[in-house]
Amino acid sequence: MFPNNRPPFRRIPKIRENVNEAIRVKEVRAVFPDGVVEVMQTPAAIRRAQELGLDLILVSPTADPPVAKAMDYGQWQYEQKKKTHDAKKKQHVIQVKEVKFRPNTDDHDYEFKKNNAHRFLKEGNRVKAVVQFRGREIAHVDLGKKLLLRFAEDLKEIGSVEGHPKLEGRNAHIIMSPIKVQLPAAVKPAKEKMPEKAPVAAPQA
């Protein structure tokens, strides 16, 4: 057995950036749980936060002066992760959805796939419409391009075509991107005028 001359493994502690002693600015606008906000020297703000059993966390380093908040570091981490998670959930990843046709696709099948494409565009995705030619169908490329142009025309209110129909091998295709549909501005109803009251006749003596 060869002797193991490697140094023992040491776990490097993770440095908490912008927390307590890691804050490098001289003074901060310190915010405390009791509502007190005070511009003070950073070491003094750290001591005050620690007296409350909290950490001093730099929450706005670009402010003048930088803003630091006294709070529990674990709770702050949890809130940051939750914000990041919620932001990712709100993000919409644009996908390319594909619908396939044949040159002799019947009207029922065409309408079904067109409706699917309409839904995909409405959801904010791009749509790739493909016409597949098999065997001798390749002699009727014009029928496939005609179908693609019809498809683009039927969906022009919700999608725009990227370029012209393209032929690659035995497939012709177009790609459509969603467009924002501008709703007409709501017309405010005219206010009804109150009928004028008739003048009251003076009583006769």
Image (tube, rainbow, N blue to C red):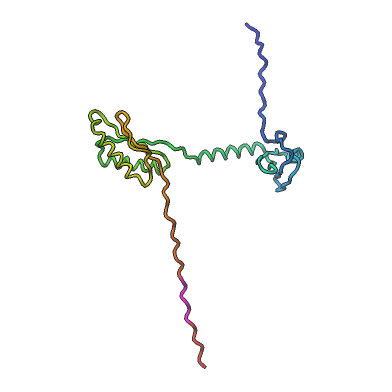
Outermost residue on the front side: it is 163
- Please tell me which residue lies in front, 200 or 191: 191
Q: Position of residue 57 (x, y in %)?
A: 68, 38
Name the residue located 45 percent from the left edge and 66 percent from the top edge.
190
Q: Main secondary structure of the magenta part?
A: loop
Name the residue located 24 percent from the left edge and 33 percent from the top edge.
140
**Quadrant of residue 142 in the image?**
top left
Outermost residue on the bottom side: it is 205
| Segment tinted magenta in the rendering | 193-198
Q: Position of residue 107 (x, y in %)?
A: 26, 42
Q: Say if the magenta span includes residue 71.
A: no
- Please tell me which residue lies in front, 54 or 94: 94
Q: Is residue 39 visible?
A: yes
Q: Is residue 99 visible?
A: no
Identify the image quadrant of the N terminus: top right
Q: Position of residue 77 (x, y in %)?
A: 62, 37
- Please tell me which residue lies in front, 54 or 61: 61
**Quadrant of residue 163 in the image?**
top left
Q: Position of residue 93 (x, y in %)?
A: 46, 37
